[in-house]
């Protein structure tokens, strides 16, 4: 129960502070859903824009302007490469290709839409998410999953995999 309260509290803080340009904690939120009728996994990530830009700048050694007037197509290309490297999902022991659909900016949060196609069924899933962990020691990546009506929450605070989840 305390894990659910922690996730809910973090979500409320994240949404409340997303209206401001300053925050003292480092958190991102990922929603990962299996949609069997569409035979795919849908992923939505919400990451503070300034944290993401800093992570991309460190990774690619260049100025990044996601969400800014000066944003370029190269900035979005770097975002795609970063997500591919730092978010990995394995279904039934096989790594799946995550497709970047789009992104949007809401206040100072980058919302990223992703999907994994051709997922007919899932017996186990394994998730790896170390985004922004190289930038902030106290970064937390909260992952909320919904697979076959089983909802679960995870908090990533280090470079590790969530053990295979049997569904």
Image (tube, rainbow, N blue to C red):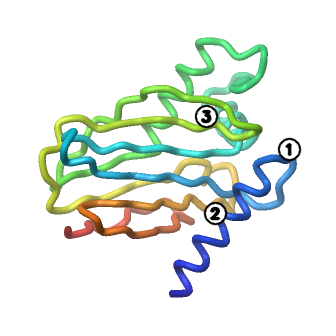
Residue matched to label 2? 11
Position of residue 60 relative to residue 10, above or below, is: above
The x and y percentages for residue 37 are: 19, 44
Residue matched to label 1? 21
Depth check: give the residue in front, 116 or 130.
116
Q: Quadrant of residue 139?
A: bottom right
Q: Quadrant of residue 24?
A: bottom right
The x and y percentages for residue 125 are: 25, 59
**Distance between mark 3 and mark 2 Cα atoms:** 27 Å
Q: Earlier in the sequence, mark 3 or mark 2?
A: 2
Number of other residues with Cα within 10 Å of mark 1, as a class: few under 14, some 14 to 19, many 20 or more: few
Depth check: give the residue in front, 93 or 49.
49
Position of the C terminus by quadrant: bottom left
Number of other residues with Cα within 10 Å of mark 2, as a class: few under 14, some 14 to 19, many 20 or more: some
The x and y percentages for residue 136 are: 70, 55
Mark 2: secondary structure: helix
Residue matched to label 3? 59
Q: Earlier in the sequence, mark 3 or mark 1?
A: 1
Residue farthest to the front, as pictured:
37
Left or right placement of residue 80 versus residue 116 in this view? right
Identify the residue at image location x=59%, y=80%: 5
Q: Earlier in the sequence, mark 2 or mark 1?
A: 2
Identify the residue at image location x=48%, y=44%: 44
The x and y percentages for residue 59 are: 61, 34
**Distance between mark 2 and mark 1 Cα atoms:** 17 Å
Mark 1: secondary structure: loop
Depth check: give the residue in front, 123 or 139.
123
Identify the residue at image location x=36%, y=43%: 42
Left or right placement of residue 52 versus residue 79 in this view? right
């Amino acid at each position: 129960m305390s894990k659910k309260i922690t996730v809910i509290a973090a979500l409320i803080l994240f949404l409340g502070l997303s209206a401001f340009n300053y925050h003292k904690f480092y958190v991102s939120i990922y929603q990962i859903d299996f949609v069997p009728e569409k035979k795919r996994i849908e992923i939505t990530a919400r990451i503070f824009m300034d944290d993401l830009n800093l992570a991309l700048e460190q990774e690619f050694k260049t100025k990044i302007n996601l969400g800014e007037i000066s944003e370029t197509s190269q900035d979005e290309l770097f975002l795609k490469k970063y997500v591919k490297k730092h978010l990995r999902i394995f279904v039934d022991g096989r790594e799946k290709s995550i497709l970047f659909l789009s992104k949007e900016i809401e206040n100072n949060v980058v919302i990223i839409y992703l999907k994994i196609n051709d997922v007919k069924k899932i017996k186990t899933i394994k998730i790896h998410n170390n985004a922004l962990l190289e930038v902030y020691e106290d970064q937390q990546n909260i992952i909320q999953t919904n697979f076959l009506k089983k909802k679960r929450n995870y908090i990533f605070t280090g470079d590790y995999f969530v053990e295979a989840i049997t569904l």
